[in-house]
Image (tube, helix red, strand yellow):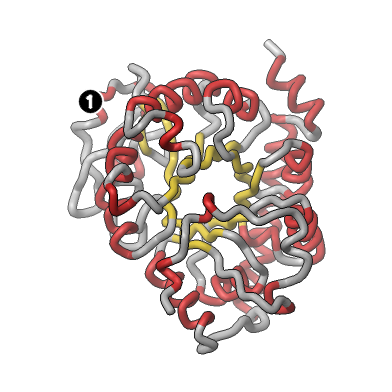
Amino acid sequence: MSYQDGQPLLSSKRSPGTFGKSVMDSEELKLPQAIAHRGFRAQFPENTILAFEGAVKAGAHAIETDLHLSRDGVVMISHDATLKRVFGEEGKVIDCDYSYLKTLRTLEAPHVPMASLKEVLELLCQPALRKMWLLLDIKIDNNAENIIRLTAETLNDVGGGVEFWGNRVVLGCWTLNFIPLCERYLPGFPITHIGYSIPYAREFLEIPNVSFNMLYAILDGPKGEKFLKDARAAGRDVYTWTVNDEQVMKWTIAHGIDGVCTDDPVKFLDICEKYLNGEVSSEPWSCRMAFVLMYYQFLAYIFSYLFRCRHGFTLKTAEKAHLAP
């Protein structure tokens, strides 16, 4: 039995109440889907067509990638707002035209160009890849309306239009102000809240049909388990980022996470296959991993406080913050 032959996550949503218990207490083992974080980042330059093709060959169920706008309004694939780390150049994506961005090459061999969203969609249009889906991390340092509008236009220009992508693209939103824009320009598209704050994520439980893509470390412990239980009771999918440690991979399986963003989909799929066949099982945290979790939880607490100071502590204060001139 091969786990890689599973159906796309978006075509098999679970109904409310499905997740009443841990997978370990359930009669049926529900394995997470492998979401290739920035493509197959462990082996290829991140967020490039080469990395996405590598993820396809590795058997990933989905691709996670990041959106920024060029100066002339082209939706580009880049995690960073700046060019320095990946391409070795000064400047920001938003300050450069598409014609210039396409001349850049990654510092990492084999030195390939920056991709655009259109190119990624064209890749996924291939008949053999129709089961794959795409998680878009829409970066908050873009103008919210511009990037959502231009993303919608790009989706409409590739394949069969927006209807073609409606069950294959998840819109990743960090803040509240993106939600009404997604509903305006891409009505009916799945939305996931990306974050690292459980209190802030709970605000999104008030919005129908929003799933969650959370830093894995904050889902560990009583508060994280309570959030997982509540999200499942509401019928929401929960994904995690970014999982590369084998012990954490086993943890995500044991806790019924729906999808796991990982730099190494081959490693994760191998763990899933072994778990499915009873060759591995979840285990208590090692001292090293317990320290790592506490470290990430501490950082998440600090950054989530600063994040909420900027974007609002509740839906009402967030709305006021984004409506302010």
Q: Position of residue 133 (x, y in %)?
A: 44, 48
Q: Position of residue 14 (x, y in %)?
A: 65, 56
Q: In this image, 69 relative to 299: left or right?
A: left
Give the residue at x 65% y 61%. Answer: 217
Query: Mark 1 highlights which residue?
Result: 100
Give the residue at x 50% y 25%. Answer: 148
Q: Is residue 99 above or below residue 266?
A: above
Q: Amino acid at mark 1?
A: Tyr
| SS assignment at label 1 | helix
Is residue 207 visible from the viewing direction of this image? yes
Nearer-the-camera pick, 142 or 277:
277
Q: Is residue 92 above or below residue 216?
A: above
Residue sticking out furthest to the bottom: 279
Q: Is residue 180 above or below residue 133?
A: above
Give the residue at x 43% y 58%. Answer: 61
Give the residue at x 36% y 49%. Answer: 130
Q: In this image, 135 relative to 129: left or right?
A: right
**Image quadrant of residue 44?**
bottom left
Quarter of the picture containing the N terminus is bottom left
Quarter of the picture containing the C terminus is top right
